[in-house]
Image (spheres, grey):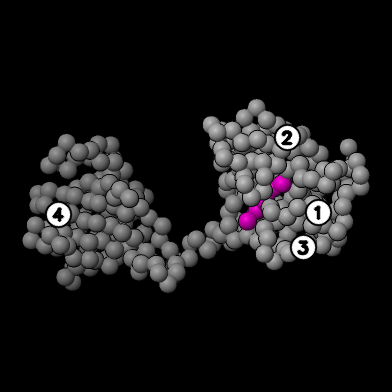
Amino acid sequence: MRIVTMMVAAAVSLTGCSSREPSEMRPGDNNAQPPIGVSQWALESNRDGSSLALLNATGGTAIRLFCRAGKNLMLVNVPSFKPIASEERLSLGTGGNVVALVADPRGDTLRGGVSGSGPVPDDLKALVAGPVSASYGAQRSGPHPAPPPNLARAFVTTCFSQATAASQAASEPTSTTSPCLVQDGDLLRMTPLRAVGTEPFWGARIEGRCVTYSTPEDQKGTRVWTRFNTGPQGGIWTGNLAGKPFVLRTSPVVNCSDGMSDNRYQMAVELTVNGETRRGCAEPIPK
């Protein structure tokens, strides 16, 4: 099967591309159609993302790979696949490189057939470097001819740039982000923790760089603004309470006991407060 390279940026005119995803575009939208009897890879891009599609000889789409603009998301659509109620896995690969994507067992009502989606694969370059195949249950599409290197390279570059942009955006605080989760202008991505200790009794709720320290005399707790750092064993929260150093450290441990119950924790805590060193255990706060 002969491959004809088509540079869409210069040779393909898209109808209504300002409001439609590349994954929704139909081959009929293109002014330039593949010659009769020839399948052809096409690269389609607009503000919503970029897609690499194999257009078959009848003007339909055999398979389409789509990367969403501003997101770390790749979608693979195969119009010829039939939905299977119990199947939620669609695989894409070439040779020994295969990636598993999550498919909706109800099918893709927007694009037709079945679509699978997931984060942009780290080995996307290898996945489109050779003959491309997709499988869904017992159904298989391909192997299809490898995309032309220039189209594959442009598609991979765009996908990774979108994924990088999405990752950067996710790490930046917004106007609604709690100040407890912002340090030096960066977003702190941390699982909230609950710490408990005895002799004397104390507790702490840790959310980002905020530690709410409580005792039997202060059951509501006092918020301590700290600076968070990662130590050799775990997290370190450093601040001041009533003018004295307040330092809380966590470290992994097997079966930490709070001394009050049969509960066992996977983190130990050491707390310096009011000139004393106290010990306890910690665990993630359930969502």
User: Is 67 within the magenta?
Assistant: yes
Marks 2/4 in contact by CB < 8 Å: the verdict is no
Q: Residue at x 72, y 63 (%)?
A: 17
> Quick one: 55 or 124, which is closer to the camera?
55
> Quick one: 101 or 106, which is closer to the camera?
106
Q: Give the label on residue 15, or none.
A: 3
Q: Which kind of residue does numbered mark 3 sit on? A: Thr
Q: Residue at x 59, y 33 (%)?
A: 84
Marks 4/3 in contact by CB < 8 Å: the verdict is no
- Left or right: residue 139 compared with residue 101: right
What is the secondary structure assignment of the residue under circle 4?
A: strand
Q: Which dot, 2 or 1, sits closer to the camera?
A: 1
Q: Cα distance, mark 2 to mark 1?
A: 22 Å
Q: Give the label on residue 28, or none.
A: 1
Q: Cα distance, mark 3 to mark 2?
A: 28 Å
Q: Earlier in the sequence, mark 1 or mark 3?
A: 3
Q: Quadrant of the N terminus?
A: top right
User: Callout 3: few (<14), some (14-19), or many (20+) C-alpha neighbours within 10 Å?
Assistant: some
Q: Cα distance, mark 1 to mark 4?
A: 69 Å
- The residue labelled by disc 4 is 202
Q: Residue at x 57, y 48 (%)?
A: 119
Q: Earlier in the sequence, mark 4 or mark 3?
A: 3
